[in-house]
Image: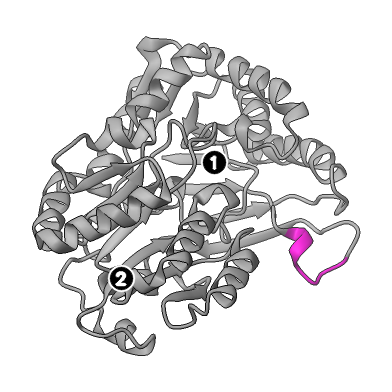
Amino acid sequence: MKILVVQESDWFERGPLQQNHLMENLSLRGHDIKVIDHEILWSEKENKDLISKREVFKNTSRIYENASITVIRPPIIKIPTLDYISLVYSRKKEIEKQIKEFKPDVIVGFFMLSAYLGLKAAKKHNIPFIYYWIDIYHSQIPLKLYHPLGKSIEKYVLKNSDAVIAINEKLKDRVIELGANPNKTYIERAGIDFKRFNSEIDGAEIRKKYGFKEEDTILLFVGVLYNFSGLKELAEEFGKKSGNYTNIKLLFVGNGDAYDDLIEIRDKYGLQNQLILTGKQPFDSIPKFIAAGDICILPAYLTEIMVDIVPIKMYEYMAMKKPVISTELPGVMNEFGDGNGVFYVKSAEELLCKVMDLIKSDVIKKEGKKAKAFVSSSDWNKIADHFENLIGEIK
């Protein structure tokens, strides 16, 4: 089967996200996958060419060694705002080119502009179109002024897609609320590569590298350090009362908007040995970092971006027998409920209190086992099976 994926995000620099895992799994099954992506982080790179060249990356894989994905990056004008305007033109042209030459059996759209253009082309050429929701897309537009426009584009695509996929129950409710046909809306939860995220992995190497002692309890966060991630507030609260948390260490793995502020907080309170910022790490090293942690955390604000989503890292934490403390995010609470190794708090202050409770009760390992048991059926192979079946139904 030939599958064309369209998205306005970077296939290589973001995630790996749901689409990376799923499409590489499908590639391993013999499906021919092409992805039209967008160099979303172009402004952070040294290449200052005003207009980028069309690029084709053949036989790529980020996760599975034998996967083979072709990634096509249409040209853009590298000026803020004009990059997205030029993206619309070049992407439309590229989609038509791939329909003519690649002849896809199905088009799968992520995000907004790409999904809209993919849907229009699919309808024109009578190709099934699937709209895949891993996030509240319009909420990610930097300027709120454009949120209504983004939402109207989403509504159009949702209403006219042959199938809509959401990654959890709350997100499914949201897309139906926005106009998706309930009879054509499905859930494909995030999966886990259990060979990679194996609870038997030893984190001793990471603990030694960063100077952690056996008696230390490591609070771990992996991912983009967004300003709304709650990490700054947690670090600030931790710093004010660090004397109460002598054997607790914060290990934040990743980069993002909050990184520099976290360095300031670390230096302000003298937390060089208690707040460890590793920067972005290779994907292959992430399981060792998770293995080194004792409790994983998700202290994000209840924003429009976070209200309905379930980050894929939640499943990976839990697969490695790590209990998780999260703020009261509706999507997360609905997905994992109570008694499954996930605990919910309202604030950074509460998070640290909950950590102390778990330590004093000596239940960290017990709760980690509950977490792994809950996600034990979330295998990427099963999700790939469901996706193949869905394509068969709509073709």
Amino acid carrying label 1: it is Val
Given this view, does label 2 or label 1 mark the residue nearer the observer? 2
Percent of width and height locating residue 331: 37, 32
Residue underneath mark 1: 5
Which residues are the magenta region?
A: 42-48
Instruction: Please give the name of the residue rendered at 33% of the width and 26% of the height, measured from the top-left corner.
Output: 169
User: So how many labels did they put on this image?
Assistant: 2
Instruction: Please give the name of the residue rendered at 40% of the width and 29% of the height, measured from the top-left corner.
Output: 166
294 vs 189, nearest the viewer: 294
Residue underneath mark 2: 218
291 vs 213, nearest the viewer: 213
341 vs 314, nearest the viewer: 341
Instruction: Please give the name of the residue rendered at 38% of the width and 11% of the height, measured from the top-left corner.
Output: 182
212 vs 269, left or right, is left
Percent of width and height locating residue 147: 69, 26
Secondary-structure class at tag 1: strand
Instruction: Please give the name of the residue rendered at 72% of the width and 31% of the height, measured from the top-left corner.
Output: 144
Real-space Cα distance between discs 2 and 1? Answer: 39 Å
Q: Quadrant of residue 322?
A: bottom left
Amino acid carrying label 2: it is Ile
Percent of width and height locating residue 223: 47, 59
Percent of width and height locating residue 143: 75, 35
Whether residue 323 can be seen here:
yes
Q: Residues within 10 Å of mark 2 (few under 14, many from 20)?
A: many
